[in-house]
């Protein structure tokens, strides 16, 4: 979390100055969210959640990382927004949150971590109000076939085996001292 928050990819200074972390794609496709309830699954440290709250949505963000949720709550205070953040496993989201939303949202880099899409989808369905909708914007799963350098195919598209790798750095900072 610390590496991501200090990286140029997440550009925290501009975000704190009021810049949205959302891209034109999701902004145009979701349209006006003023007054709508929005559950952001796998929210990381809350930038997209807070960006939706700045646009008038009543937001609840969920992530499994206690550190990410702690930082999301801190950012919520710093940005003077009214988002709520909960720590928990997305595969148990409906039980943890126990309410319904107009919109369930997740974005970039989330679907590849889901061990069972049926269980995940059931959580989403349970979280939606009648007439609500689920919105996902993410990378195509074909990206998970490649090695970390994206130079060669390493895994089958239909891989069902657990993948364990030892890597250094992070997608947000290749030079970060992480293993």
Image (cartoon, grey):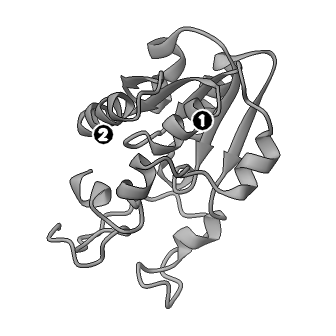
Residue at x 41%, y 59% (from the top left corner): 10
Residue 73 is at least partly visible in this image: yes
- Tell me where residue 175 appears, x and y as whole percent: 23, 78
* Residue identifier under label 1: 52
Disc 2 target residue: 68
Q: Is residue 54 left or right of residue 135?
A: left
* Residue toward you, 171 or 93: 171
Q: Is 55 located above or below residue 3 in the figure?
A: above
Number of residues whose C-alpha sits closer than 10 Å to that of mark 2, classed few (under 14), some (14–19) or many (20 or more): many
Q: Would residue 125 appear left or right of 114 to someone viewing this image?
A: right
Marks counted in the figure total 2
Residue 26 vertical position relative to residue 118 in the rendered view, above or below: below
- Residue at image position (55%, 74%) is 145
Quadrant in the picture for residue 80: top left
Q: Percent from the top left, x then y, of residue 78?
A: 33, 34
Residue at figure coordinates x 42%, y 85% from the top left: 149
């Amino acid at each position: 979390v610390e590496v991501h928050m200090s990286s140029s990819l997440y550009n925290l200074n501009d975000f704190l100055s009021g810049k949205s972390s959302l891209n034109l794609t999701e902004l145009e496709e979701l349209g006006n969210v003023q007054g709508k309830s929005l559950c952001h699954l796998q929210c990381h440290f809350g930038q997209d959640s807070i960006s939706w709250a700045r646009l008038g949505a009543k937001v609840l963000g969920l992530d499994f990382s206690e550190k990410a949720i702690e930082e999301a709550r801190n950012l919520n205070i710093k940005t003077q927004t009214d988002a709520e953040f909960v720590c928990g496993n997305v595969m148990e989201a409906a039980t943890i949150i126990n309410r319904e939303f107009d919109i369930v949202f997740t974005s970039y880099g989330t679907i590849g971590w889901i061990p069972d899409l049926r269980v995940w989808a059931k959580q989403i369905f349970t979280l939606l109000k009648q007439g609500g909708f689920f919105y996902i914007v993410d990378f195509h799963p074909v990206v998970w076939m490649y090695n970390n350098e994206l130079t060669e195919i390493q895994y089958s598209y239909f891989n069902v085996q657990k993948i364990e790798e030892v890597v250094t750095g992070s997608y947000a900072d290749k030079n970060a001292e992480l293993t």
